[in-house]
Amino acid sequence: MDTAGRYRRFAATEARGHSPSYERLAGGVAGDPGLLALIDELPPARRQPNLLFAVVRYLDGPAGDDYAAFRAWAVTHWPRLRSTMLERRTQTNEPARCAVLLPVLARLPQPLALIEVGASAGLCLYPDRYAYRYDGGTPFGATDGPVVLDCATTGPVPLPARPPEVAWRAGIDLNPLDVADPQDVRWLECLVWPGQHARLTRLRGAVRVARAEPPTLVRGDIDETIRDLVAATPAGTTPVVLHSAVLAYLPPEDRESFAATMRDLGCAWISNEAPGVLPAVDRRLSPLPAPDGLLFTLALNEHPLARTGPHGQSLHWLPAP
């Protein structure tokens, strides 16, 4: 798909109904040959709508939906905009994804040693430090903390009575973000779409949690680093490797290499990825109707368990096979 099609699809299927501002801007870019030509100077992985719009906000460009103002600013400041798009990554760190991971984590032998792949700032490494409210019910978990995660459910979800016990936590990322660094935190905030005030409040609360107990984050390639981290987990814990909306950014051959590594390690492996990212998971979904491409598939060791909203807002548990 060319860049125009990429922005057109983003406007129609991702931003529509979630961010009117981004829907209008993405539609404007899709029909703008001049700006598209500039974007096409970037490597394909850096042409993402999310990255462009977040960097404009990060650099204090126009934050509204006035496409003419957005375009004028982007063209005038293109060298700086281009440089920052090459430097930064779309490291959306949505702690609400813990709400869809929780039923799986709580069913594993406790205590857990969590390892997150593509951890960004590590905000999804704290499922034991958040409170949870499913279907508008009574919150449970860390109800005295700054974060309450809301999630709508359908199907036979095995909701736990309490969060899991986490004894050890670490993450891997090509470019870890530091919750103590104001610029890194500002970048995380710019990745939250305009108008999504609840997400921004949730992010800031999760940053407070992480600052109180900073995560161990390792810079490196996931396939080269994961074995060392699994080996480092404390005795008496259940090692758990988890990731959400990460593998799509890797080439297919790298995804398969990582999957082969996880099969070889044999530890608990929780994936929460879009359709098409993990073929072995997709094959096990084949008897079901074609999945909604905007939903992720939650799986344990490549066995699909549920369909999830990409930001942890919904959880549909699948029938037992």
Image (cartoon, helix red, strand yellow):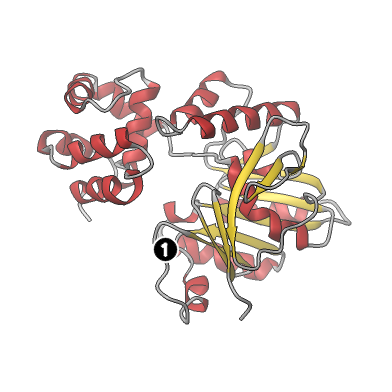
* Residue at the farthest right position: 236
**Quick one: 13 or 135, which is closer to the camera?**
135
* Rendering coords of residue 132 (x, y %): 69, 45
User: Quarter of the image holding residue 26?
Assistant: top left
Instruction: Note whether 162 is above or below 20 in the view shown.
Output: below
- Quarter of the image containing the C terminus? bottom right
User: Quarter of the image holding residue 305?
Assistant: bottom right
- Residue under label 1: 252
* Rendering coords of residue 164 (x, y %): 79, 51
Q: Left or right: where does residue 173 sit relative to residue 192? A: right
* Residue at the farthest front position: 137
Instruction: Note whether 125 is above or below 69 in the view shown.
Output: below
**Quick one: 276 or 64, which is closer to the camera?**
64
**Quick one: 29 or 19, which is closer to the camera?**
19
- Quarter of the image containing the N terminus? bottom left
* Rendering coords of residue 29 (x, y %): 19, 37
Q: Left or right: where does residue 72 sit relative to residue 313? A: left
* Rendering coords of residue 302 (x, y %): 59, 70
Q: Residue at x 46, y 79 (%)?
A: 286
Q: Badge 1: few (under 14), some or many (20 or more) residues near its Cα, within 10 Å?
A: some
Q: Residue at x 55, y 58 (%)?
A: 272
The residue type indicated by label 1 comes to Pro
Give the mark count. Answer: 1
Q: Left or right: where does residue 296 sit relative to residue 238? A: left
Give the secondary structure at mark 1.
helix
**Quick one: 63 or 77, which is closer to the camera?**
63
Q: Residue at x 59, y 43 (%)?
A: 96
